[in-house]
Image: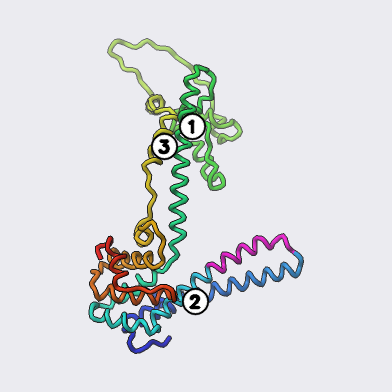
Amino acid sequence: MGFPAYVPAAVRAHITTLLDGDDWEPQGWAATLADAEKSLAEIETAIETRIRRGEVEYLDSLRKQRAEAVEHRDRLAGDVDCLHRLADDERMQEAYAKLTKEFTHDEQWRGFVDAAWAARIDYSKYRERLKRTAELRDKIADTSEKLAGLLREAADTGFPFWPSEFFGIPELLRQTDNHEMQNHNLHMWRSMRKYVLGDPSRSDVPESEQPQEESESKHVPEIVSRVLEPDEKPEIDPEEEARNTLRYAWGTAPDLSELLDTVTKAARSFQPSESGMIGAGIESRKASIKTEYLRAFGSLLTSRRDFSMTAGIMNAMAVTAIVVLNQSKIDVSYDDVRKALSKLGG
């Protein structure tokens, strides 16, 4: 692509690499966008074909794919358009002029362009995620606290036949299988459970599900009593000793209600937050496209690139923010940058 004369050589080279790729990363963003456009067109064609054939049962799935493809394409198109603006928007002439007085290495130019481009994301979904996380945290705390209280009430009734899973962690583990990842770890957990709990046999696994060689080798051991001499130590099989130790350790474990108290305490003290660029962007309670972008931009420059926030760089950031955000209703001044970065040491 062509560049205006005022664009520094390092910026030209870096934007060209991002858009067109290089030997290290052949797939540039322009090609990635083209692939996304192609995929979207294929989905559109598939929808038209299904409609024409009257195969309506496939449409819901295809329309969901189309919505996802459109979102992906639009996001990539925005990224590519932003790179083009950084390359040829005449407003960037002022920003590059200011940065020429600040930068002495090509890496500084690349770092500034990368930060300006990467900070351009939708922060609302991260705010929504934090909000949802806080709501779930409160529900988890309330529910675990309530369940712990109910289990204690059950124990206080004196009724002797409550399920032991209500109180003992070992029995809860003994009766619980792992069905995640389409039972990927089911048999592994069942085989390891007896070692974890110190069980002497596979009593928690049905006979039909035990390995054949293990099932066939089962037998009732003969019990032999022998009187030991006063100074003689009993010979204990190391495996049996380990099982005894584990069973004793599990016997001292807290009840399920106590564990739920810990869950409640953890939930009550948990304060969900984001880190890095995103955390900086949504640091304030009030959503603001301008402030979120400037804080994220500044965070990338200071934390990842070790930039010092000089007046020249902040003035360049103000101009660059206008170009990157590209919304007529948003204007960015040096003072806006200074205030946004005040908590970042700007």
Q: Does the magenta stretch include residue 157?
A: no
Q: Counting residues from the N terminus, which is met first, the one under dot 3 or under dot 1?
A: 1
- Residue 137 lies, in percent from the top left, at 44, 44
Q: Nearer the viewer, mark 3 or mark 2?
A: 3
Q: Specify the amino acid type for callout 2.
A: Ala
Residue count near mark 1 (Cα–Cα under 10 Å), binned few <14, some 14–19, many ≥20: some
Tell how many labels: 3
As drawn, the residue found furthest toward the right would be: 54
Left-right relation of 254 to 172: left
Residue drawn where x is 58% and y is 31% of the image: 206
Q: In which quarter of the image is residue 63?
A: bottom right
Q: Is mark 1 on a helix, strand or loop?
A: helix
- Residue 342 lies, in percent from the top left, at 27, 63
Please tell me which residue lies in front, 176 or 102: 102
Q: Counting residues from the N terminus, which is met first, the one under dot 3 or under dot 2?
A: 2
Residue count near mark 2 (Cα–Cα under 10 Å), binned few <14, some 14–19, many ≥20: some
Q: Counting residues from the N terminus, which is met first, the one under dot 1 or under dot 2?
A: 2
Q: Specify the amino acid type for callout 1.
A: Leu
- Residue 263 lies, in percent from the top left, at 41, 37
Q: What label does residue 264 carry, if any? A: 3
Left-right relation of 321 to 211: left
Q: Specify the amino acid type for callout 3.
A: Thr
Q: Say above or below: 229 vs 297.
A: above
Q: CB of mark 3 within 8 Å of CB of mark 1?
A: no
Q: What element carries label 3?
A: helix
Q: In which quarter of the image is the C terminus?
A: bottom left
The stretch of residues the image draws in magenta is: 55-71
For label 1, the residue is: 147
Q: Looking at the image, can residue 169 be seen? A: no
